Image: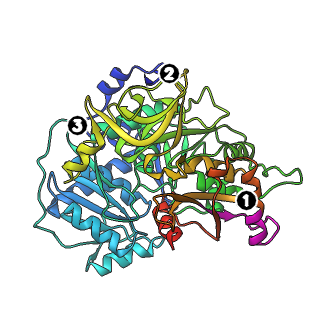
Protein backbone atom coordinates (compact mmCIF):
# COMPACT_ATOMS: atom_id res chain seq x y z
CA UNK A 1 0.00 0.00 0.00
CA UNK A 2 1.21 3.53 -0.60
CA UNK A 3 0.07 6.96 0.42
CA UNK A 4 1.06 10.61 0.81
CA UNK A 5 0.84 12.65 3.97
CA UNK A 6 -2.45 14.21 4.96
CA UNK A 7 -2.11 17.91 4.17
CA UNK A 8 -3.95 19.08 7.30
CA UNK A 9 -4.57 22.40 5.58
CA UNK A 10 -0.87 22.90 4.79
CA UNK A 11 0.18 24.06 1.33
CA UNK A 12 3.47 22.18 1.01
CA UNK A 13 4.62 24.06 -2.08
CA UNK A 14 4.01 27.35 -0.32
CA UNK A 15 5.95 26.12 2.71
CA UNK A 16 8.89 25.10 0.53
CA UNK A 17 8.84 28.41 -1.32
CA UNK A 18 8.90 30.38 1.95
CA UNK A 19 11.91 28.60 3.46
CA UNK A 20 15.11 30.61 3.89
CA UNK A 21 18.19 29.43 1.98
CA UNK A 22 20.03 28.41 5.13
CA UNK A 23 18.97 27.33 8.61
CA UNK A 24 20.73 30.47 9.90
CA UNK A 25 17.83 32.39 8.39
CA UNK A 26 15.67 31.24 11.32
CA UNK A 27 17.10 33.50 14.06
CA UNK A 28 17.52 36.38 11.60
CA UNK A 29 13.87 36.18 10.56
CA UNK A 30 12.68 36.45 14.16
CA UNK A 31 15.30 39.03 15.09
CA UNK A 32 13.71 41.26 12.46
CA UNK A 33 10.11 40.43 13.41
CA UNK A 34 10.31 40.29 17.20
CA UNK A 35 13.83 41.19 18.37
CA UNK A 36 13.03 41.23 22.10
CA UNK A 37 11.04 37.98 22.11
CA UNK A 38 12.67 35.17 24.14
CA UNK A 39 14.47 32.60 22.01
CA UNK A 40 16.49 30.51 24.48
CA UNK A 41 16.90 29.91 28.16
CA UNK A 42 20.00 27.96 29.15
CA UNK A 43 19.39 27.71 32.89
CA UNK A 44 21.32 30.91 33.59
CA UNK A 45 19.93 33.59 31.31
CA UNK A 46 17.35 34.39 28.67
CA UNK A 47 18.44 35.04 25.10
CA UNK A 48 16.25 37.25 22.94
CA UNK A 49 16.11 36.63 19.21
CA UNK A 50 18.16 39.80 18.68
CA UNK A 51 20.82 38.52 21.08
CA UNK A 52 20.82 35.12 19.41
CA UNK A 53 21.23 36.64 15.94
CA UNK A 54 24.04 38.90 17.19
CA UNK A 55 25.83 35.91 18.75
CA UNK A 56 25.55 34.04 15.44
CA UNK A 57 27.13 37.00 13.59
CA UNK A 58 29.97 37.23 16.12
CA UNK A 59 30.62 33.49 15.97
CA UNK A 60 30.57 33.40 12.17
CA UNK A 61 33.37 35.94 12.20
CA UNK A 62 35.26 33.88 14.80
CA UNK A 63 34.98 30.72 12.67
CA UNK A 64 36.46 32.56 9.70
CA UNK A 65 39.34 33.73 11.91
CA UNK A 66 39.85 30.09 12.90
CA UNK A 67 40.18 29.33 9.17
CA UNK A 68 36.97 27.30 8.93
CA UNK A 69 35.88 27.52 5.31
CA UNK A 70 32.81 26.70 3.24
CA UNK A 71 32.71 22.94 2.74
CA UNK A 72 34.73 22.21 5.90
CA UNK A 73 33.35 20.13 8.73
CA UNK A 74 33.13 21.86 12.12
CA UNK A 75 32.91 19.31 14.91
CA UNK A 76 31.29 20.48 18.14
CA UNK A 77 31.57 18.27 21.21
CA UNK A 78 29.23 19.02 24.07
CA UNK A 79 25.79 18.71 25.60
CA UNK A 80 22.74 20.93 25.21
CA UNK A 81 23.72 24.54 25.73
CA UNK A 82 23.34 27.89 24.00
CA UNK A 83 26.77 27.53 22.40
CA UNK A 84 25.60 24.49 20.42
CA UNK A 85 22.67 26.44 19.06
CA UNK A 86 24.82 29.43 18.11
CA UNK A 87 27.53 27.29 16.51
CA UNK A 88 24.92 25.40 14.47
CA UNK A 89 23.70 28.64 12.90
CA UNK A 90 27.17 30.17 12.60
CA UNK A 91 28.50 27.15 10.69
CA UNK A 92 25.48 27.36 8.39
CA UNK A 93 26.26 31.03 7.77
CA UNK A 94 29.62 30.17 6.20
CA UNK A 95 28.45 26.92 4.53
CA UNK A 96 30.49 24.72 6.88
CA UNK A 97 28.96 21.40 7.94
CA UNK A 98 28.13 21.13 11.64
CA UNK A 99 29.10 17.77 13.19
CA UNK A 100 27.55 17.56 16.64
CA UNK A 101 29.05 14.95 18.97
CA UNK A 102 27.72 14.22 22.45
CA UNK A 103 30.33 14.76 25.12
CA UNK A 104 29.27 11.58 26.90
CA UNK A 105 30.49 9.37 24.08
CA UNK A 106 33.60 7.32 24.76
CA UNK A 107 37.04 8.41 23.60
CA UNK A 108 36.94 5.70 20.91
CA UNK A 109 33.60 6.91 19.57
CA UNK A 110 34.65 10.57 19.52
CA UNK A 111 37.91 9.71 17.75
CA UNK A 112 36.10 7.57 15.18
CA UNK A 113 33.81 10.44 14.24
CA UNK A 114 36.69 12.92 14.15
CA UNK A 115 38.66 10.65 11.86
CA UNK A 116 35.79 9.81 9.51
CA UNK A 117 34.42 13.35 9.22
CA UNK A 118 37.83 14.93 8.61
CA UNK A 119 36.76 17.93 10.68
CA UNK A 120 38.94 21.02 10.15
CA UNK A 121 38.30 22.29 13.67
CA UNK A 122 36.85 20.87 16.87
CA UNK A 123 35.22 23.09 19.48
CA UNK A 124 34.44 21.69 22.93
CA UNK A 125 31.61 23.52 24.74
CA UNK A 126 33.01 22.62 28.13
CA UNK A 127 30.24 23.65 30.54
CA UNK A 128 30.21 22.50 34.21
CA UNK A 129 27.29 20.21 33.33
CA UNK A 130 29.50 18.19 30.98
CA UNK A 131 32.89 17.33 32.52
CA UNK A 132 33.29 14.58 29.93
CA UNK A 133 33.42 17.24 27.21
CA UNK A 134 36.28 19.00 29.01
CA UNK A 135 38.09 15.66 29.33
CA UNK A 136 37.84 15.08 25.56
CA UNK A 137 39.22 18.56 24.92
CA UNK A 138 42.18 18.03 27.24
CA UNK A 139 42.85 14.62 25.70
CA UNK A 140 43.06 16.26 22.26
CA UNK A 141 45.24 19.14 23.48
CA UNK A 142 42.56 21.80 22.90
CA UNK A 143 43.24 25.30 24.20
CA UNK A 144 40.80 27.25 26.42
CA UNK A 145 39.21 30.21 24.66
CA UNK A 146 36.64 32.83 25.56
CA UNK A 147 33.67 32.80 23.16
CA UNK A 148 32.39 36.17 21.99
CA UNK A 149 28.96 35.81 23.61
CA UNK A 150 29.21 33.46 26.59
CA UNK A 151 30.92 33.43 29.98
CA UNK A 152 31.57 29.68 29.82
CA UNK A 153 34.98 29.21 28.17
CA UNK A 154 35.24 26.86 25.21
CA UNK A 155 38.17 24.69 24.23
CA UNK A 156 39.35 24.95 20.64
CA UNK A 157 41.31 22.20 18.96
CA UNK A 158 44.21 22.62 16.56
CA UNK A 159 43.64 23.22 12.86
CA UNK A 160 43.42 19.96 10.89
CA UNK A 161 44.75 21.33 7.63
CA UNK A 162 44.69 17.98 5.85
CA UNK A 163 40.90 17.56 5.82
CA UNK A 164 39.30 17.55 2.37
CA UNK A 165 37.08 20.52 1.62
CA UNK A 166 33.74 19.69 0.02
CA UNK A 167 32.49 21.91 -2.78
CA UNK A 168 29.81 24.29 -1.48
CA UNK A 169 26.48 24.56 -3.29
CA UNK A 170 24.27 27.59 -3.71
CA UNK A 171 21.17 25.38 -3.64
CA UNK A 172 19.82 24.52 -0.17
CA UNK A 173 18.76 21.15 -1.62
CA UNK A 174 22.39 20.16 -2.10
CA UNK A 175 24.29 22.16 0.50
CA UNK A 176 24.90 20.00 3.57
CA UNK A 177 24.02 21.69 6.85
CA UNK A 178 24.64 18.85 9.30
CA UNK A 179 26.60 15.63 9.30
CA UNK A 180 24.92 13.43 11.90
CA UNK A 181 26.47 10.16 12.99
CA UNK A 182 24.01 7.42 13.76
CA UNK A 183 24.20 5.66 17.09
CA UNK A 184 26.14 2.44 16.58
CA UNK A 185 27.13 -0.22 19.08
CA UNK A 186 29.44 -2.20 16.80
CA UNK A 187 31.46 -1.32 13.73
CA UNK A 188 31.97 2.14 12.35
CA UNK A 189 29.35 4.89 12.71
CA UNK A 190 27.65 6.23 9.58
CA UNK A 191 27.61 9.94 8.82
CA UNK A 192 24.22 11.06 7.47
CA UNK A 193 24.38 14.16 5.27
CA UNK A 194 21.34 16.38 5.87
CA UNK A 195 20.88 19.49 3.77
CA UNK A 196 19.49 22.88 4.69
CA UNK A 197 16.30 22.04 2.80
CA UNK A 198 15.96 18.73 4.66
CA UNK A 199 16.15 20.39 8.05
CA UNK A 200 14.14 23.50 7.19
CA UNK A 201 11.34 21.41 5.70
CA UNK A 202 11.02 19.35 8.89
CA UNK A 203 11.28 22.44 11.10
CA UNK A 204 8.52 24.19 9.16
CA UNK A 205 6.14 21.24 8.80
CA UNK A 206 6.55 19.93 12.35
CA UNK A 207 6.10 23.34 13.97
CA UNK A 208 3.04 24.00 11.80
CA UNK A 209 1.44 20.62 12.53
CA UNK A 210 1.96 21.17 16.25
CA UNK A 211 0.52 24.65 16.09
CA UNK A 212 3.55 26.28 17.69
CA UNK A 213 3.36 30.03 18.30
CA UNK A 214 5.77 32.60 19.80
CA UNK A 215 3.94 32.13 23.12
CA UNK A 216 5.05 28.49 23.42
CA UNK A 217 7.77 27.25 25.76
CA UNK A 218 9.41 23.98 24.70
CA UNK A 219 11.69 21.71 26.72
CA UNK A 220 15.05 21.13 25.04
CA UNK A 221 16.48 18.10 26.80
CA UNK A 222 16.67 15.80 23.77
CA UNK A 223 20.30 16.03 22.64
CA UNK A 224 21.02 18.49 19.85
CA UNK A 225 23.64 15.94 18.82
CA UNK A 226 20.73 13.72 17.70
CA UNK A 227 18.52 14.53 14.73
CA UNK A 228 15.35 14.54 16.85
CA UNK A 229 16.77 17.15 19.21
CA UNK A 230 18.32 19.17 16.39
CA UNK A 231 15.60 19.28 13.75
CA UNK A 232 12.29 18.68 15.48
CA UNK A 233 12.96 20.26 18.89
CA UNK A 234 15.57 22.97 18.36
CA UNK A 235 14.90 24.09 14.79
CA UNK A 236 11.16 23.38 14.96
CA UNK A 237 10.75 25.49 18.10
CA UNK A 238 12.82 28.43 16.86
CA UNK A 239 11.21 28.31 13.42
CA UNK A 240 7.93 29.22 15.13
CA UNK A 241 9.50 32.04 17.15
CA UNK A 242 8.89 30.11 20.37
CA UNK A 243 11.27 29.82 23.34
CA UNK A 244 13.48 26.77 23.87
CA UNK A 245 14.41 25.86 27.45
CA UNK A 246 17.73 24.02 27.14
CA UNK A 247 18.70 21.25 29.55
CA UNK A 248 21.97 19.30 29.17
CA UNK A 249 20.81 16.02 30.73
CA UNK A 250 17.52 14.41 31.60
CA UNK A 251 16.52 13.78 35.18
CA UNK A 252 12.95 13.40 36.38
CA UNK A 253 13.50 16.10 39.00
CA UNK A 254 14.74 18.62 36.43
CA UNK A 255 11.77 17.93 34.17
CA UNK A 256 9.28 18.30 37.03
CA UNK A 257 10.91 21.61 38.00
CA UNK A 258 10.80 22.87 34.40
CA UNK A 259 7.13 21.96 34.04
CA UNK A 260 6.36 23.79 37.28
CA UNK A 261 8.72 26.78 37.20
CA UNK A 262 9.17 27.47 33.48
CA UNK A 263 5.51 26.87 32.64
CA UNK A 264 6.29 24.63 29.69
CA UNK A 265 3.62 24.31 27.03
CA UNK A 266 5.40 21.80 24.75
CA UNK A 267 7.07 18.58 25.85
CA UNK A 268 8.88 16.29 23.44
CA UNK A 269 10.69 13.21 24.64
CA UNK A 270 11.48 9.56 24.18
CA UNK A 271 9.45 6.78 25.84
CA UNK A 272 12.24 6.02 28.32
CA UNK A 273 12.03 9.61 29.59
CA UNK A 274 8.32 9.28 30.29
CA UNK A 275 8.87 5.89 31.95
CA UNK A 276 11.39 7.50 34.35
CA UNK A 277 8.94 10.28 35.13
CA UNK A 278 6.22 7.78 36.00
CA UNK A 279 8.64 5.82 38.17
CA UNK A 280 9.63 8.99 40.02
CA UNK A 281 6.09 10.19 40.75
CA UNK A 282 4.64 6.81 41.62
CA UNK A 283 0.98 5.87 41.90
CA UNK A 284 -1.88 7.07 44.04
CA UNK A 285 -4.16 5.00 46.27
CA UNK A 286 -6.27 4.19 43.21
CA UNK A 287 -3.28 2.50 41.55
CA UNK A 288 -3.12 5.12 38.80
CA UNK A 289 -0.16 7.45 38.16
CA UNK A 290 -0.19 10.57 40.29
CA UNK A 291 -1.33 13.66 38.42
CA UNK A 292 1.32 16.25 37.61
CA UNK A 293 -0.07 19.78 37.46
CA UNK A 294 1.08 21.52 34.31
CA UNK A 295 0.29 24.00 31.54
CA UNK A 296 1.13 21.63 28.71
CA UNK A 297 -1.01 21.71 25.64
CA UNK A 298 1.03 19.15 23.75
CA UNK A 299 3.17 16.11 24.63
CA UNK A 300 4.95 13.97 22.08
CA UNK A 301 6.97 10.75 22.10
CA UNK A 302 9.40 9.62 19.43
CA UNK A 303 12.81 8.07 18.91
CA UNK A 304 11.74 4.55 19.87
CA UNK A 305 8.51 2.50 20.06
CA UNK A 306 5.79 3.76 22.39
CA UNK A 307 3.82 0.99 24.08
CA UNK A 308 0.04 1.48 24.53
CA UNK A 309 0.33 0.92 28.28
CA UNK A 310 2.96 3.65 28.69
CA UNK A 311 0.91 6.01 26.51
CA UNK A 312 -2.18 5.50 28.71
CA UNK A 313 -0.26 6.08 31.93
CA UNK A 314 1.46 9.24 30.68
CA UNK A 315 -1.83 10.68 29.48
CA UNK A 316 -3.31 10.15 32.94
CA UNK A 317 -0.20 11.70 34.51
CA UNK A 318 -0.17 14.83 32.32
CA UNK A 319 -3.84 15.20 31.49
CA UNK A 320 -3.13 15.70 27.77
CA UNK A 321 -2.88 13.34 24.82
CA UNK A 322 0.56 11.81 24.28
CA UNK A 323 1.15 11.99 20.55
CA UNK A 324 3.30 9.49 18.73
CA UNK A 325 5.45 9.60 15.63
CA UNK A 326 8.06 7.84 13.59
CA UNK A 327 11.27 8.86 11.89
CA UNK A 328 14.94 8.12 11.43
CA UNK A 329 18.16 10.07 11.00
CA UNK A 330 18.08 9.52 7.25
CA UNK A 331 14.66 11.22 7.01
CA UNK A 332 15.62 14.33 9.03
CA UNK A 333 13.86 12.66 11.04
CA UNK A 334 10.06 12.90 10.80
CA UNK A 335 8.08 10.59 8.52
CA UNK A 336 4.76 10.45 10.32
CA UNK A 337 3.01 11.66 13.45
CA UNK A 338 -0.42 11.65 15.00
CA UNK A 339 -2.39 14.80 14.42
CA UNK A 340 -2.90 17.33 17.17
CA UNK A 341 -6.60 17.62 16.34
CA UNK A 342 -7.11 13.85 16.14
CA UNK A 343 -5.26 12.03 18.97
CA UNK A 344 -5.33 8.26 18.78
CA UNK A 345 -5.88 5.67 21.44
CA UNK A 346 -3.74 3.00 19.78
CA UNK A 347 -0.04 2.53 19.06
CA UNK A 348 -0.16 4.07 15.58
CA UNK A 349 2.66 6.43 14.64
CA UNK A 350 0.09 8.47 12.73
CA UNK A 351 -0.13 9.60 9.14
CA UNK A 352 2.72 10.56 6.86
CA UNK A 353 3.37 14.28 7.30
CA UNK A 354 2.41 16.64 4.46
CA UNK A 355 4.78 16.41 1.51
CA UNK A 356 6.08 12.96 2.45
CA UNK A 357 5.07 9.79 0.63
CA UNK A 358 5.23 6.28 2.07
CA UNK A 359 4.99 2.81 0.59
CA UNK A 360 4.64 -0.55 2.35
CA UNK A 361 6.11 -3.18 0.06
CA UNK A 362 6.88 -6.89 -0.15
CA UNK A 363 10.30 -8.43 -0.84
CA UNK A 364 9.94 -7.76 -4.57
CA UNK A 365 9.18 -4.07 -4.04
CA UNK A 366 5.49 -4.43 -4.84
CA UNK A 367 2.87 -2.63 -2.76
CA UNK A 368 1.07 -4.83 -0.22
CA UNK A 369 -2.62 -4.63 0.61
CA UNK A 370 -3.94 -2.34 3.33
CA UNK A 371 -3.39 -3.90 6.74
CA UNK A 372 -0.61 -6.22 5.55
CA UNK A 373 2.96 -6.12 6.87
CA UNK A 374 5.83 -5.04 4.64
CA UNK A 375 8.96 -2.94 4.39
CA UNK A 376 8.46 0.80 4.74
CA UNK A 377 9.79 3.03 1.99
CA UNK A 378 9.74 6.84 2.18
CA UNK A 379 10.13 9.70 -0.31
CA UNK A 380 10.05 13.47 0.19
CA UNK A 381 12.03 16.68 0.80
CA UNK A 382 13.29 15.18 4.06
CA UNK A 383 15.41 12.38 2.54
CA UNK A 384 19.15 12.59 3.24
CA UNK A 385 21.69 13.46 0.60
CA UNK A 386 23.47 10.20 1.47
CA UNK A 387 26.05 8.66 3.79
CA UNK A 388 29.27 10.66 3.84
CA UNK A 389 32.12 8.91 2.02
CA UNK A 390 30.00 5.74 1.77
CA UNK A 391 28.54 5.52 -1.77
CA UNK A 392 27.91 1.78 -1.49
CA UNK A 393 25.93 2.17 1.74
CA UNK A 394 23.98 5.02 0.17
CA UNK A 395 23.14 2.92 -2.88
CA UNK A 396 22.06 0.01 -0.66
CA UNK A 397 19.56 2.22 1.22
CA UNK A 398 18.09 4.04 -1.77
CA UNK A 399 15.54 2.69 -4.24
CA UNK A 400 14.63 3.89 -7.76
CA UNK A 401 12.50 7.03 -7.92
CA UNK A 402 14.01 8.73 -4.86
CA UNK A 403 12.66 6.26 -2.30
CA UNK A 404 14.62 5.17 0.76
CA UNK A 405 14.16 1.78 2.38
CA UNK A 406 13.86 2.48 6.11
CA UNK A 407 14.66 -1.08 7.14
CA UNK A 408 11.53 -1.08 9.28
CA UNK A 409 8.55 -3.36 8.93
CA UNK A 410 5.20 -1.58 9.00
CA UNK A 411 1.57 -1.84 8.05
CA UNK A 412 -0.72 0.90 6.81
CA UNK A 413 -4.42 0.75 7.49
CA UNK A 414 -7.04 1.87 4.99
CA UNK A 415 -7.25 5.31 6.67
CA UNK A 416 -3.53 5.86 6.08
CA UNK A 417 -2.43 5.30 9.68
CA UNK A 418 0.98 3.65 10.01
CA UNK A 419 1.94 1.03 12.57
CA UNK A 420 5.57 0.00 13.03
CA UNK A 421 5.87 -3.76 13.43
CA UNK A 422 9.61 -4.02 13.99
CA UNK A 423 13.06 -3.71 12.49
CA UNK A 424 13.91 -5.96 9.57
CA UNK A 425 17.37 -6.59 11.03
CA UNK A 426 15.95 -7.39 14.48
CA UNK A 427 13.74 -10.18 13.19
CA UNK A 428 14.22 -13.38 15.22
CA UNK A 429 13.71 -16.72 13.46
CA UNK A 430 12.58 -19.30 16.00
CA UNK A 431 11.65 -22.80 14.87
CA UNK A 432 10.83 -21.40 11.45
CA UNK A 433 8.51 -18.71 12.85
CA UNK A 434 9.11 -14.95 12.66
CA UNK A 435 9.28 -13.12 15.98
CA UNK A 436 9.35 -9.32 16.00
CA UNK A 437 10.84 -8.08 19.30
CA UNK A 438 8.51 -5.09 19.38
CA UNK A 439 5.46 -7.30 19.88
CA UNK A 440 7.04 -9.09 22.86
CA UNK A 441 8.29 -5.80 24.32
CA UNK A 442 4.84 -4.24 24.06
CA UNK A 443 3.33 -7.06 26.12
CA UNK A 444 6.17 -6.97 28.66
CA UNK A 445 5.96 -3.21 29.10
CA UNK A 446 2.28 -3.49 29.97
CA UNK A 447 3.15 -5.43 33.15
CA UNK A 448 3.21 -3.13 36.21
CA UNK A 449 6.55 -4.52 37.40
CA UNK A 450 8.36 -3.56 34.17
CA UNK A 451 9.73 -0.06 33.59
CA UNK A 452 11.06 -0.92 30.14
CA UNK A 453 12.29 -3.95 28.22
CA UNK A 454 14.32 -5.02 25.21
CA UNK A 455 14.06 -8.32 23.34
CA UNK A 456 16.89 -9.75 21.23
CA UNK A 457 17.77 -13.00 19.50
CA UNK A 458 20.39 -15.49 20.67
CA UNK A 459 21.98 -18.07 18.41
CA UNK A 460 21.01 -21.62 19.33
CA UNK A 461 23.78 -23.70 20.87
CA UNK A 462 22.89 -26.50 18.46
CA UNK A 463 24.30 -24.44 15.59
CA UNK A 464 21.25 -25.15 13.44
CA UNK A 465 20.56 -21.53 12.50
CA UNK A 466 17.68 -21.37 14.97
CA UNK A 467 17.42 -18.50 17.46
CA UNK A 468 16.16 -18.16 21.00
CA UNK A 469 14.18 -15.19 22.27
CA UNK A 470 15.87 -13.38 25.18
CA UNK A 471 14.21 -10.55 27.09
CA UNK A 472 16.07 -7.97 29.17
CA UNK A 473 13.86 -6.10 31.63
CA UNK A 474 14.28 -3.12 33.90
CA UNK A 475 12.07 -3.72 36.94
CA UNK A 476 10.22 -1.06 38.91
CA UNK A 477 11.89 -1.12 42.37
CA UNK A 478 8.55 -0.37 44.04
CA UNK A 479 7.01 -3.60 42.83
CA UNK A 480 7.09 -6.33 45.48
CA UNK A 481 8.83 -9.69 45.17
CA UNK A 482 12.34 -10.93 44.53
CA UNK A 483 13.91 -10.82 41.07
CA UNK A 484 13.52 -14.58 40.72
CA UNK A 485 9.82 -14.39 41.67
CA UNK A 486 9.18 -11.53 39.28
CA UNK A 487 10.88 -13.20 36.31
CA UNK A 488 8.80 -16.32 36.92
CA UNK A 489 5.70 -14.15 37.16
CA UNK A 490 6.61 -12.51 33.86
CA UNK A 491 7.08 -15.87 32.15
CA UNK A 492 3.60 -16.95 33.26
CA UNK A 493 2.19 -13.57 32.23
CA UNK A 494 3.66 -13.84 28.74
CA UNK A 495 2.56 -17.45 28.34
CA UNK A 496 -1.04 -16.32 28.65
CA UNK A 497 -0.67 -13.57 26.06
CA UNK A 498 1.76 -14.78 23.40
CA UNK A 499 2.16 -17.83 21.21
CA UNK A 500 4.68 -20.30 22.69
CA UNK A 501 7.32 -19.57 20.02
CA UNK A 502 7.23 -15.85 20.91
CA UNK A 503 7.80 -16.39 24.64
CA UNK A 504 11.38 -15.73 25.80
CA UNK A 505 13.64 -18.64 26.60
CA UNK A 506 15.17 -16.43 29.26
CA UNK A 507 14.24 -13.21 31.03
CA UNK A 508 17.20 -11.27 32.40
CA UNK A 509 16.60 -8.48 34.93
CA UNK A 510 18.95 -5.48 34.87
CA UNK A 511 19.06 -2.50 37.18
CA UNK A 512 19.36 -0.20 34.14
CA UNK A 513 19.20 -1.12 30.48
CA UNK A 514 22.15 0.28 28.47
CA UNK A 515 21.05 3.35 26.57
CA UNK A 516 22.40 6.03 24.26
CA UNK A 517 22.37 9.67 25.30
CA UNK A 518 18.98 9.96 23.57
CA UNK A 519 17.48 7.30 25.85
CA UNK A 520 17.36 4.76 23.03
CA UNK A 521 18.18 1.26 24.30
CA UNK A 522 21.43 -0.12 22.88
CA UNK A 523 20.22 -3.45 21.57
CA UNK A 524 23.56 -4.28 19.97
CA UNK A 525 25.15 -4.37 23.41
CA UNK A 526 22.32 -6.54 24.72
CA UNK A 527 22.70 -8.94 21.80
CA UNK A 528 26.34 -9.34 22.76
CA UNK A 529 25.37 -10.03 26.38
CA UNK A 530 22.76 -12.55 25.31
CA UNK A 531 25.30 -14.66 23.44
CA UNK A 532 27.41 -15.23 26.57
Q: Answer few, some or many: residues within 10 Å of disc 3's Cα (few below 14, many 20 plus, some between 14 and 19).
A: some
Q: Residue at x 58, y 35 (%)?
A: 348
Q: Answer few, some or many: residues within 10 Å of disc 2's Cα (few below 14, many 20 plus, some between 14 and 19).
A: few
In this image, 295 relative to 363: left or right?
right
Residue 515 placement (x, y as % from top left):
51, 63
- Residue 302 painted magenta: no
Q: Name above or below for residue 421 compared with residue 286.
A: above
Report the disc number at residue 172: 3
Residue 283 placement (x, y as % from top left):
81, 55
Residue 422 placement (x, y as % from top left):
51, 45
| Quadrant location, the N terminus | top left
Residue 417 placement (x, y as % from top left):
54, 28
Depth order, front residue of 404/343: 404
Which is in the foreground here, disc 3 or disc 1?
A: 1
Which is in the foreground here, disc 1 or disc 2?
A: 1
The region drawn magenta spans 470-488
Quadrant assignment, res 379: top left
Depth order, front residue of 53/529: 529
Q: Residue at x 63, y 62 (%)?
A: 505
Depth order, front residue of 93/181: 181
Residue 94 seen: no
- Residue 472 painted magenta: yes
Q: Earlier in the sequence, mark 1 or mark 2?
A: 2
Q: Earlier in the sequence, mark 3 or mark 2?
A: 2
Q: CA distance from mark 3 to mark 2?
A: 26 Å
| Residue to which mark 1 is pinned | 491
Q: Residue at x 15, y 69 (%)?
A: 160
Element assignment for label 2:
loop
Element assignment for label 1:
helix
Report the disc number at residue 8: 2
Amino acid sequence: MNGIGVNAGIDVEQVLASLPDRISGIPRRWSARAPEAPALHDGRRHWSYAQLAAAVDQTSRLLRQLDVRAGDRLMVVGENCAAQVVLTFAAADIDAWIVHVNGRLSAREVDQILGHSGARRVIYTSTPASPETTAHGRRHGAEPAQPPFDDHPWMIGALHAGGAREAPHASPEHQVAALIYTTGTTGNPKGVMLTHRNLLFIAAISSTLRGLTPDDRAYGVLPITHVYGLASVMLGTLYAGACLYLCPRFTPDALIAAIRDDRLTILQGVPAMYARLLEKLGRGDDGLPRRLENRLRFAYAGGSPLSPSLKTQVEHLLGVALHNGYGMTETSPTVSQTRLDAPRGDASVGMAIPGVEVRVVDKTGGDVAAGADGELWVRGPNIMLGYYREPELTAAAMRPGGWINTGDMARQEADGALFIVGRTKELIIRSGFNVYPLEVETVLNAHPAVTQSAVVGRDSKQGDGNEEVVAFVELDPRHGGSTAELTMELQQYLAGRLSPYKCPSEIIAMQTLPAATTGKILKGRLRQLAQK
